[in-house]
């Protein structure tokens, strides 16, 4: 019986061990399959992510490169429109070609025959007879049409170039530029699919096979039947037999790119047999301990490494290209880190190339800006009724600030100050377009409201996403009647003769280019002789010091309180105040200012300061100005005695500012003195002038105006 019991116990123990072993084997088999699935899927997703980043980088580079080529081609068309003489100046064409970084420039007539170009050997070539160039012929038949091709070999010498063409603006024909596709070749050479695959998984741990739209991209080290791998279900663990060996498979697909991972089943089941052997030779405690150890090792050598890589990739995608992946726990992670770092280095190199290209574009935009903006002073030497001057200081980013002034007819001065809400060549070209439209509309005699409204419609019709803020004014130089429109952010200050600058009250409309149906309000102001206007863009008040404190309007008005002899001195003293405030701090916005003085009908003007105790030199200066317009001696004497009488009523230490405006018919003298509420007319009821008025000034002074008709 003992033998029988021992026999049954032995059988039961063996059966129990067999059942437990079988159940354990099945359990660990499923765990091994799940682990294989996670590992294969993770590596496929990592590879898909790298491929996606590479493809997105190429697309982004091609889009930016195409946009830059189109803008440079448009710039050549615009330069040709402004200066048709460059067609016969090969040196100028070569200089433009070098500045734009182009290899070829071709300018055709309406038949598609090249009439000017770089190199000169292309002149006479008929583009309509070449298959590659025939699509560009639409630029001749359809004005405004633009076309850019992918890089391909041309007909002159077999150069591999990327061509772009636009319609000519000065005549029927087209402007075509050819560029060496250096950036595209550099980006494509930085992406090696075979290298990415080898960095994700080596033959020691399996294989990855890739297909694009059903076409095999790599075969790896195995002779794998393509039809079998294409028939595998997606996102499921499958099985194939290759060369007598069973492999576990897992496939994913995205946008036509199909990735298949293969792992030998023997490597998967090896873990299960190892776990089963340890289970049969140990007790439950040892099994639990082994499970904990396996989990710790898995977390330490796999999960932690993947988390570090994911964190580094997140920072890289956020723009921190100096980030590097340093996971060296396993050979696989070492190879993966090396591949990712190589990709980041390629992206960083591409970024440096784009920065160099941007600097070149900003240099060209600066040149365009300097060419278009008026710079001479006096701008209208024959016009004595007014004086005008503008100043532009360009920032590192070369913004879209601009200004212009011109006579629309012999009685009206038109002036404007604006800011394009972007930088570089697009801003410069948009600025030139806006100035051209406004000049054309102003020459028709349209009111400022109609000029701005029509300019907005034309700029919106260009289908551009750019926006333009603008101050536009039209001054009648004989009457001083000023009508103006403010579309956006430019501000203006007004200074009445003998007083200080004050912010000009006006209604601001929508920026140009935002909405074709926008309406604008026209404001009106009558300028008196001696009045001044000061316009400025947002770069003045937003200029900041090292502590990021803006200059602001209060500091601007303080800078304008200093006396200025001419309109040239007004922007100069504001710029000096800005430089003292900002120091060497780099600014990110252009600074533009425009100063206008209305002189009106006065032939002679003077402004002097003196004290009541010693007015002799000031009176002598005013007398000289009166004599310069052939005034009668009696009139000079009466004005001289009037000024002496007024000054005699003031304390000796009182400071007096005297402003004279005169012509052959009348003289006007404005006295400003620092004695609030003191009226000399109360003590001098009889003065030899036609009109005398007293006004207490709100700045804490007193103002006395004397007017006399000259005989």
Image (tube, rainbow, N blue to C red):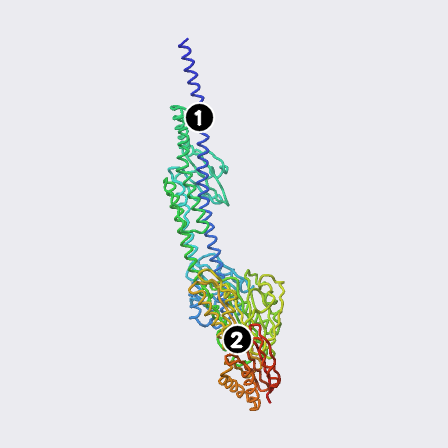
Tell me if 520 is positioned left or right of 26 in this view: right
Work out which residue is located at the far top of the displayed protein and give it: 1
Work out which residue is located at the far bottom of the displayed protein and give it: 633
Q: Residues within 10 Å of mark 1 (few under 14, many from 20)?
A: some
Q: Residues within 10 Å of mark 2 (few under 14, many from 20)?
A: many
Q: Nearer the viewer, residue 383 or 241?
A: 383
Image location of residue 81, percent across then percent down: 51, 70
Total numbered circles: 2
Image location of residue 659, percent across then percent down: 54, 80
Res 191 label: none
Image location of residue 299, percent across then percent down: 41, 36
Work out whether 581 lies above or below 184. below
Give the SS element for disc 2.
strand
Res 388 label: 2
Work out whether 254 lies above or below 420. above
Q: Quadrant of the C terminus?
A: bottom right
Compare marks 2 and 1 and give the one earlier in the sequence: 1
Work out whether 11 lies above or below 632. above
Res 24 label: 1
Work out whether 432 lies above or below 609. above
- The answer to whether residue 424 of the structure is visible from this angle is no
Q: CA distance from mark 2 to mark 1?
A: 95 Å
Q: Quadrant of the N terminus?
A: top left
Q: Are marks 2 and 1 in contact (CB under 8 Å)?
A: no
Q: Nearer the viewer, residue 654 or 364?
A: 654
Closer mark to the observer between disc 2 and disc 1 = 2
Q: Nearer the viewer, residue 190 or 499?
A: 499
Among the 4 quarters of the image, the one containing residue 646: bottom right
Give the SS element for disc 1.
helix
- The answer to whether residue 697 of the structure is visible from this angle is yes
Image location of residue 259, percent across then percent down: 46, 41
């Amino acid at each position: 019986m003992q033998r029988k019991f021992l026999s049954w116990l032995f059988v039961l123990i063996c059966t129990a061990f067999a059942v437990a072993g079988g159940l354990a084997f099945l359990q660990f088999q499923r765990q091994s399959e799940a682990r294989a699935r996670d590992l294969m899927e993770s590596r496929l997703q990592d590879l898909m992510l790298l491929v996606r980043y590479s493809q997105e980088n190429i697309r982004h580079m091609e889009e930016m490169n195409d946009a830059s080529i189109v803008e440079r081609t448009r710039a050549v068309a615009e330069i040709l429109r402004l200066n048709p003489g460059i067609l016969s100046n090969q040196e100028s064409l070569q200089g433009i070609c070098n500045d734009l970084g182009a290899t070829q420039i071709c300018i055709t007539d309406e038949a598609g025959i090249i009439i000017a170009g770089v190199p000169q050997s292309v002149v006479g070539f008929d583009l309509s007879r070449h298959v590659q160039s025939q699509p560009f012929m639409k630029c001749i038949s359809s004005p405004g049409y633009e076309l850019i091709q992918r890089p391909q070999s041309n007909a002159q010498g077999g150069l591999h170039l990327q061509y772009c063409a636009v319609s000519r603006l000065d005549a029927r024909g087209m402007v075509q530029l050819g560029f060496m596709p250096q950036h595209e070749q550099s980006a494509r050479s930085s992406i090696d699919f075979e290298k990415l695959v080898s960095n994700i998984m080596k033959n020691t741990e399996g294989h990855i096979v890739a297909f694009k739209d059903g076409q095999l991209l790599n075969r790896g080290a195995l002779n794998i039947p393509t039809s079998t791998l294409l028939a595998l279900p997606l996102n499921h663990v499958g099985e194939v037999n290759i060369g007598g060996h069973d492999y576990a498979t897992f496939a994913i697909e995205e946008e036509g790119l199909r990735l298949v991972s293969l792992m030998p089943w023997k490597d998967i089941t090896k873990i299960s047999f190892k776990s089963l052997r340890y289970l049969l030779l140990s007790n439950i405690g040892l099994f639990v301990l082994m499970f904990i150890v396996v989990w710790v090792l898995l977390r330490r050598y796999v999960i932690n490494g993947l988390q570090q890589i994911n964190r580094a990739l997140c920072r890289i995608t956020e723009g921190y290209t100096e980030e590097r992946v340093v996971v060296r726990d396993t050979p696989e992670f070492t190879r993966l880190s090396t591949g990712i770092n190589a990709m980041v280095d390629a992206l960083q190199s591409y970024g440096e190339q784009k920065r160099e290209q941007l600097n070149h574009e900003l240099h060209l935009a600066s040149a365009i800006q300097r060419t278009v903006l008026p710079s001479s002073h006096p701008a209208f030497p024959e016009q004595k009724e007014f004086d005008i001057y503008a100043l532009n200081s360009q920032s590192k980013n070369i913004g879209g600030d601009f200004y212009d002034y011109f006579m629309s007819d012999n009685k009206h001065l038109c002036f404007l100050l604006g800011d394009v809400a972007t930088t570089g060549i697009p801003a410069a070209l948009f600025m030139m377009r806006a100035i051209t439209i406004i000049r054309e509309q102003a020459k028709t005699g349209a009111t400022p409201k109609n000029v701005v409204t029509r300019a907005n419609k034309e700029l919106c019709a260009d289908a551009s996403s750019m926006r333009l803020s603008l101050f536009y004014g039209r001054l009648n130089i004989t009457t001083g009647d000023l009508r103006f429109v403010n579309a956006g952010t430019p501000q203006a200050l007004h200074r009445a003769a003998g007083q200080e600058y004050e912010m000009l009250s006006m209604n601001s409309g929508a920026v140009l280019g935002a909405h074709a149906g926008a309406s604008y309000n026209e404001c009106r102001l009558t300028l008196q002789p001696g009045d001044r206007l000061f316009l400025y863009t947002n770069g003045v008040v937003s200029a900041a010091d090292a502590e990021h404190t803006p200059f602001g309007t209060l500091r601007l008005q303080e800078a304008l309180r200093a006396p200025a002899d001419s309109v040239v001195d007004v922007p100069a003293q504001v710029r000096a105040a800005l430089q003292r405030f900002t120091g060497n701090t780099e600014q990110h916005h252009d600074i533009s200012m425009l100063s206008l003085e209305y002189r009106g009908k006065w032939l002679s003007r003077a402004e002097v300061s003196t004290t009541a105790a010693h007015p002799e030199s000031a009176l002598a200066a005013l007398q000289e100005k009166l004599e310069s317009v052939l005034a009668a001696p009696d009139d000079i004497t009466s004005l001289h005695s009037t000024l002496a009488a007024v000054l005699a009523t003031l304390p000796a230490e009182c400071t007096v500012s005297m402003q004279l405006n005169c012509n052959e018919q009348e003289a006007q003298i404005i006295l400003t003195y620092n004695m609030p509420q003191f009226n000399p007319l109360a003590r001098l009821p009889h003065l030899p002038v036609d009109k005398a008025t007293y006004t207490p000034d709100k700045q804490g002074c007193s103002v006395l105006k004397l007017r006399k008709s000259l005989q």
